[in-house]
Image: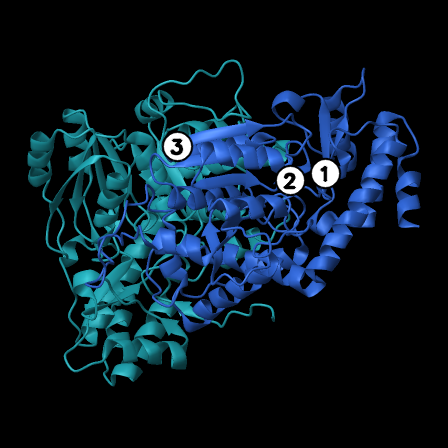
Chain colours: A cyan, B blue
């Protein structure tokens, strides 16, 4: 069996995307013991960096060891007790995922839906909150399946008014679109590295408000083998050990509870992803995603292609492009990959076979990446006008 | 915030240990899309390599994205339905963990225990199986908390005789001690990279027998958003989405179900860990761990230190050393770390403050690592005889 030797790809799909080389370099560094003073300081640094990424003062800001949906499940299983009412506004695949995970947590799940390609008006959400009286409202900010970006400030306001816990998954959007944990009143937010943060999948940053942390700690059951005399079981035990955020908070906190063995290499990567973003400045990074997203949008329109969904509400970092009649969408994707080494995305559910999804995010929110992709699309589709339209945006 | 610059450490604790530089180099390679033909081929290669590591013909052999306990929880939550009887023979901290996770899966959990430092006799296990009539027997092979390595061949035989599913966690032991998935009749086995495999924590290799896979697939509920017309919900839904092995098997299998986004960098690392082991040969690697473990054992005895537990049954790759009366165990560990850059381990539960745990595993199952550690211990303890005793083993 020979060593893995990945082909060179320009990943312009909805994520994962090409990692920033600085992140990969950080991940090649040697390991240190999990309770080494250097390591616990690195963990504290990582927490501080992600407070900036999430725009929060939450002490409880750290990493869940797993892919983005590990963060989602940790948040939901730690918040939800069996029988709790959870409201999920669904505007794409990942809304369905939040509902599905909540069901597995034995919540009483209520959903409201808008057609794919739209977002919710605050009034519709407030009406459902009045009707359902949920303990938790769970929503994604950006749903890559539709490219839509749900405005959250009003929903945060509604949740505070009705004393509802607000959970948001920002995996697809954070770093490339405005995201405000504290200003919007979010109780828990989770993310992943593989979109606008420019890293690989495998680590899920999370932030938890003091009131959510208190609720979770009111269910703390420290596992046998590491509990001490001060531990008394309280509340309903969280249904997962791995995702038991009460214990995970004690792992990242001063107690340094020996819950799991931190995925050190992923932590090195997550640290560098956040450092890149903080160095650039969040506002600058969002503006960069807006610019290159706008250029890609102009480019695909310049190619004479239609864009799916409510463009006013699309995320900066991804666009869904209608596959023209008579064009074999999979053939186009295969030619882009085989001849040009460029990957664009396919779709799910109602959009399967109907749209391509093209990303401009993280390390690939760059003009060369945008123009190279449009140039290759011109060749494969036998059309012109894409590159020129994008160049006009840059001019 | 400056870049992380880890200090040079020689990690001689019970894991994580210093990663093999080849693994870190593999992890610095650029990403490829998750359904790129190159990537799916790399996933298939990884499955084939881990079949060799686990010594199994199980088709269902892949990675769970998370630390070792992610693999444990995935196995247990996918096997256990609420009310199922689970028997856990506990001989250290990680036995308690299996019981605790099974409880959170709402099993009816029964435990049997031997004192820390011992392993189970087959007769005791068979008596408990007769008594409890469990659906699942869950056990660890090596419990790093005590250093003990439980013989499993007889337990596999007992489970087959009584039609019990046998789950085993081999995180601490695999690669450094004999481990036979098929020959011992194991239904599911899980592992981690951070011990004898010489990689970082963050990926959990798993193998699943055809009968266990059938049981899990009899509970398949494909999530909304990616399900198709062929999907019909069957059996009791698995209580976790992230750890739903029915879906994860379809992600790694020909269906390529878009469940999660594979942690590509961790996969590169896991692939290289397995490749190192397969290149060396499993028997050779086990013999290497036996040799360097024996040298370390002789060395600590040469220093006049007592060894904890039933040495006949200890894992090759770790030794628990009694802290002598009048010696401050934490001071010794701090001096080793600060003056020599060497980490050895502390302990849990009944052994807390009583023993150090010293590992010789993976990349650090090397004579230089053993002798350097013993030499530093001689200095810090103000004793002699450690290095010479180990050198005699090597002579």
Q: Is residue A373 above or below residue A24?
A: below
Mark before the other along the chain sequence, 1 or 3? 3
Circles 2 and 3 on the same subunit: yes
Mark before the other along the chain sequence, 1 or 2? 2
Q: Is residue B72 left or right of residue A142?
A: right
Q: Which residue is mark 2?
A: B150
Q: Is residue B23 above or below residue A207?
A: below
Mark before the other along the chain sequence, 2 or 3? 3
Label 3 sits on a secondary structure element that is: helix
Which is more toward the observer, A205 or B390? B390
User: Given the image, what chain letter belongs to the residue carrying mark 1?
Assistant: B
Label 2 sits on a secondary structure element that is: loop
Label 1 sits on a secondary structure element that is: helix
Residue A278 in view of the camera = no
Q: Which residue is mark 3?
A: B104
Q: Which residue is mark 1?
A: B313
Hey, which quadrant is residue B126 in on the image? top right
C-alpha gap between disc 2 and disc 3: 25 Å
Tell me if label 1 and label 2 are in contact, CB under 8 Å.
yes
Residue B308 in view of the camera = yes
Q: Is residue A11 left or right of residue B379?
A: left
Q: Residue at x 44, y 39 (%)?
A: A63
Give the percent coordinates (x, y) of residue B66: 47, 46
C-alpha gap between disc 1 and disc 3: 31 Å
Q: Residue at x 24, y 54 (%)?
A: A315
Tell me if label 2 and label 3 are in contact, CB under 8 Å.
no
Q: Is residue B50 left or right of residue B320?
A: left
Hey, which quadrant is residue B134 in on the image? top left
């Amino acid at each position: 069996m020979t060593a893995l030797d990945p082909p060179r790809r320009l990943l312009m799909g909805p994520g994962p995307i090409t990692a920033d080389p600085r992140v990969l370099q950080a991940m090649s560094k040697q390991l240190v013991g999990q309770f080494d003073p250097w390591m616990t300081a690195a963990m504290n640094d990582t927490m501080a960096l992600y407070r900036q990424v999430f725009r929060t003062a939450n002490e409880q800001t750290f990493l869940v060891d797993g892919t983005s949906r590990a963060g989602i499940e940790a948040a939901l299983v730690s918040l939800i007790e069996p029988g709790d009412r959870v409201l999920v506004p669904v505007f794409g695949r990942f809304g369905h995922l939040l509902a599905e995970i909540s069901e597995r947590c034995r919540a009483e799940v209520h959903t409201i839906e808008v057609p794919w390609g739209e977002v919710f008006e605050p009034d519709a959400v407030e009406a459902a909150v009045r009707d359902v009286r949920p303990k938790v409202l769970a929503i994604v900010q950006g749903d890559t399946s539709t490219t839509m970006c749900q405005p959250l400030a009003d929903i945060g306001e509604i949740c505070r008014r009705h004393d509802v816990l607000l959970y948001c998954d920002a995996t697809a959007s954070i770093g490339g679109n405005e995201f405000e944990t504290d200003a919007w009143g979010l109780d828990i937010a989770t993310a992943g590295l593989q979109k606008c943060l420019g890293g690989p999948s495998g680590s899920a940053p999370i932030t938890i408000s003091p009131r959510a942390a208190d609720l979770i700690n009111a269910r703390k059951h420290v596992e046998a083998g590491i509990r001490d005399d001060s531990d008394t079981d309280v509340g309903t035990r969280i249904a997962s050990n791995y995702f038991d955020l009460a214990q995970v908070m004690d792992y990242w906190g001063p107690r340094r509870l020996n819950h799991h063995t931190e995925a050190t290499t992923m932590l090195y990567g997550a640290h560098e992803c956040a450092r890149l973003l903080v160095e650039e400045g969040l506002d600058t990074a969002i503006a960069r995603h807006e610019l290159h997203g706008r250029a890609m949008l102009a480019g695909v329109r310049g190619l004479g292609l239609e864009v799916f969904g409510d463009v006013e509400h699309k995320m900066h970092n991804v666009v869904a492009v209608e596959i023209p009649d008579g064009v074999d969408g999979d053939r186009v994707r295969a030619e882009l990959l085989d001849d040009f080494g460029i990957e664009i995305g396919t779709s799910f559910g109602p959009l399967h076979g109907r749209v391509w999804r093209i990303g401009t995010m993280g390390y690939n929110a760059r003009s060369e990446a945008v123009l190279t992709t449009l140039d290759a699309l011109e060749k494969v589709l036998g059309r012109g006008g894409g590159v020129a339209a994008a160049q006009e945006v840059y001019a």
